[in-house]
Image: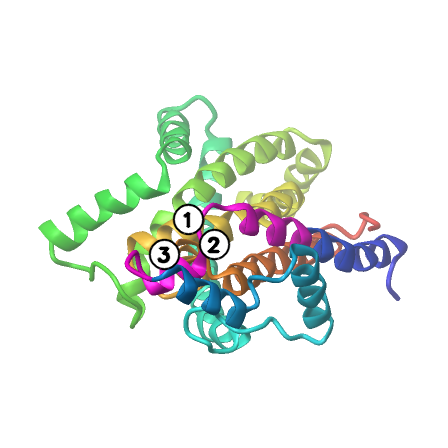
Amino acid sequence: MISPAIRKRLLMFPITVFFVCTVVFFVIHLVPGDPAALMLGESAEPGDIEALRSQLGLDRPLGAQYTSYLVGLLRLDLGRSIWTKEPVLDRILDRYPATMELALFAMVFAVVFAIPIGILSAMKPNSLIDRLAMFLSVLGVSIPNFFLGLVLIVVFSVELDLLPVSGRGGIEHIILPAVTLGLGMSAILARMTRSQMIEALASDYVRTARAKGLSEFTVITKHALRNALTPVVTILGLQMGALLTGAIITETIFSYEGIGSLMIQSIARRDYPQVQACVLVIAISYVLANLFADLTYRALDPRIRL
């Protein structure tokens, strides 16, 4: 049975999508630049530009364009690209798996890297391991994606020639983009895991488990870690949106053919339907990721009632 809170989230979903669509539509139309002029070039005649604007429907009032856009959304029609004339939905479906693949690899890297570090730091607070781990986490949060990506390219692609510089192919193509995208998230998760584990290890139920003679591994994994992971899952849900937005920069640096690089190209071309579709898909993915995180709470801690 669906809880009232989940029902409320599901009812808020279309309102959120409508708000995102509205804001993106008007913001992208306020960006300086004429798609028709960009398509025809600087030497184009004014008459040719106006004819192309009429052909593309850009000469219509903004309110009429907005109404047509909303009607198309209700029909699940995202329109056609101004530049390629292809259905926007087709290009989204072609690029979306690449972005989700990158986001999931980055999340796996962040979780596998951060949670063990957080546990080790909590078990030995203020030790050399703890201080080193916290220093690395601060460093990971501080380094911007675009700088880290360039450093990784220089070291692992140019100097060591171990990994490809750009493109999408096998597993070797996704390692550098995933590390670039996931490092900042791993730093946040490591600090959160450490703080929650320190609190859990000092709790009564952990002392009781140790008094029963359970092994330290069982105490850590079955008792302390499970309770400490609940707020970490919250961070994971929130950071999924950061991964999707961070993918815009990361995909551009590594020429990775996902939604992020597609959106950058579309913004440069003032391809309104394509930009609107890209932002809409990212927003929907973010909302669904947070909803999934909420549902995961119940599995981790049965005491929680959504």
Residue 212 image offset from top left, x and y in percent: 68, 42
Q: Who is closer to the viewer here, 198 or 269?
A: 269
Main SS class of the magenta portion in the image: helix
Return the disc, 1 or 2, that comes first in the chain's sequence.
2
Seen in the image, is 182 located left or right of residue 17? left
The answer to whether 109 is drawn above or below residue 271 in the figure is above
**Residue 59 drawn in magenta:** no
Q: What residue did someone put label 1 on?
A: 182
**Residue 291 x %, y %:** 70, 56
Give the residue at mark 2: 107
**Taking 1 as reference, is 250 above or below it?**
above
At label 3, the amino acid type is Glu
> Which tag, 3 or 2, sits closer to the chain's start?
2
Residue 194 at what x, y percent from top left? 53, 34
- Res. 291 visible in picture: yes
Tell me which segment is drawn in magenta: 20-44
Which residue is identified by label 3? Answer: 251
The amino acid beneath tag 1 is: Gly
Q: Quadrant of the N terminus?
A: bottom right
Residue 53: x and y in percent read 50, 65
Kind of residue indicated by mark 2: Met
